[in-house]
Amino acid sequence: MFTAKKSRLALAAAALTGIALVAAGCASNDPLAPETDAPAGDTIVIGSQAYYSNEIIAEIYAQALENAGFDVSRDAFNSGQRDAYIPALEAGEITLFPEYSGNLLQFFDPETTARTSEEVYAALPDALPDGLSVLDQSSATDQDSYTVTAAFADANALVQIGDLAKVTTPLTLGGPPELAERPYGPSGLLETYGVTVAFSPTADTTVEALLANTIQVANVYTADPRIQTDDLVVLEDPEGLFLASNVVPVVSGELPEGAADVINAVSAALTPEGLVALNVQSTVDELGADDIAKQWLTENGLI
């Protein structure tokens, strides 16, 4: 009896093992299965600022990683400003965060002299504390700029800020009142590009004043949705009058193998115009970050 019972148990165990192997084989051949299997327990905690544009980028990271088979947590979305989330990054409580290169550099190195996109990105590794690193930066930016209407740009052949020096009619610059004293304000325009402007403190009505032609040059952020909806042109800044702030992923510790490649592919696809379009979908079309991210990833062949 004992021998027979033992034999039956052995046969049952073998059968269960065979079923498990078949199931595993079926799972590995599933054409809808993710391309990458994340190591067990390696949950990537993604954070975002309490800012719709930053949350959209964080959601793009999250969906791209999930599509590649990684476990993701969104518990750190809407984490506030740098004073709140940087300590969490340093402590390893947040794994991945979409940041802005120039502002991040100044947070850790207020005296930095880096200005252009390349200079800022090159300076970041030395400025970041131990345990933090950056992946590939995107060409997309969210920073100060000098912007004109498309009609004004076409009429005066404007591409770069320096081209304003060729405009023969008087120019008025509009922006927040403090712009008058900022190093990239009227004095910086003259010193860096030889452009002379009057100044009008237009504050919250800056774009309206630009469209009404009461000012001809406006201080507008490069990811502002109105760049698309109001047909504006951001003038290039080759001399680095403004501190470059490209979208850049910050990593705490090490990502699971293959995760960095997923995020770098996102950064390569995210353009300045693309970021503006994402923000239009949020502010004008009133779509949620999850829907915006899924559509963008699909259109760019990333999921």
Image: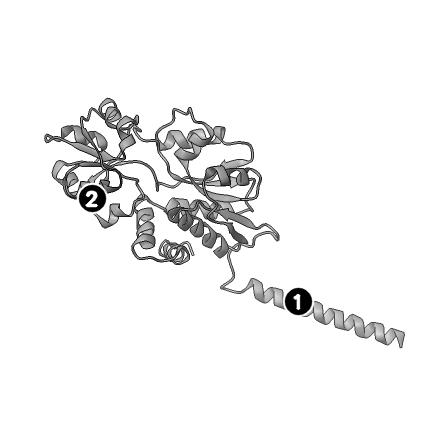
Name the residue: 40% across, 31% down: 120
Vertical side of 3 occupied by 72: above or below: above
Q: Residue furthest top?
A: 191
On the image, the x and y values in percent for residue 45 come to 53, 48
Q: Amino acid at mark 1?
A: Ala
Q: Quadrant of residue 165?
A: top left
- Of residue 178 and residue 168, the one placed in the foreground of this image is 178
Distance between the alpha carbons at the discs numbered 2 and 1: 66 Å
Badge 1, how many Cα within 10 Å: few under 14, some, many 20+?
few
Total numbered circles: 2
Q: Residue furthest left?
A: 168
Badge 2, how many Cα within 10 Å: few under 14, some, many 20+?
some
Q: Which mark is residue 20?
A: 1
Name the residue: 38% across, 49% down: 52
The tag earlier along the polypeptide, 2 or 1, is: 1
Q: Quadrant of residue 223?
A: top left
Helix, strand or loop at disc 2? Answer: helix
Q: What residue is pinned by disc 2?
A: 208
On the image, the x and y values in percent for residue 76 come to 51, 48
Name the residue: 49% across, 64% down: 32
- Of residue 282 and residue 297, the one placed in the foreground of this image is 282
- Of residue 135 and residue 35, the one placed in the foreground of this image is 135
Vertical side of 81 occupied by 24: above or below: below
Name the residue: 41% across, 25% down: 112
On the image, the x and y values in percent for residue 289 come to 40, 55
Helix, strand or loop at disc 1? Answer: helix
Q: Amino acid at mark 2?
A: Glu
Left or right, 211 with respect to 219, comes to left
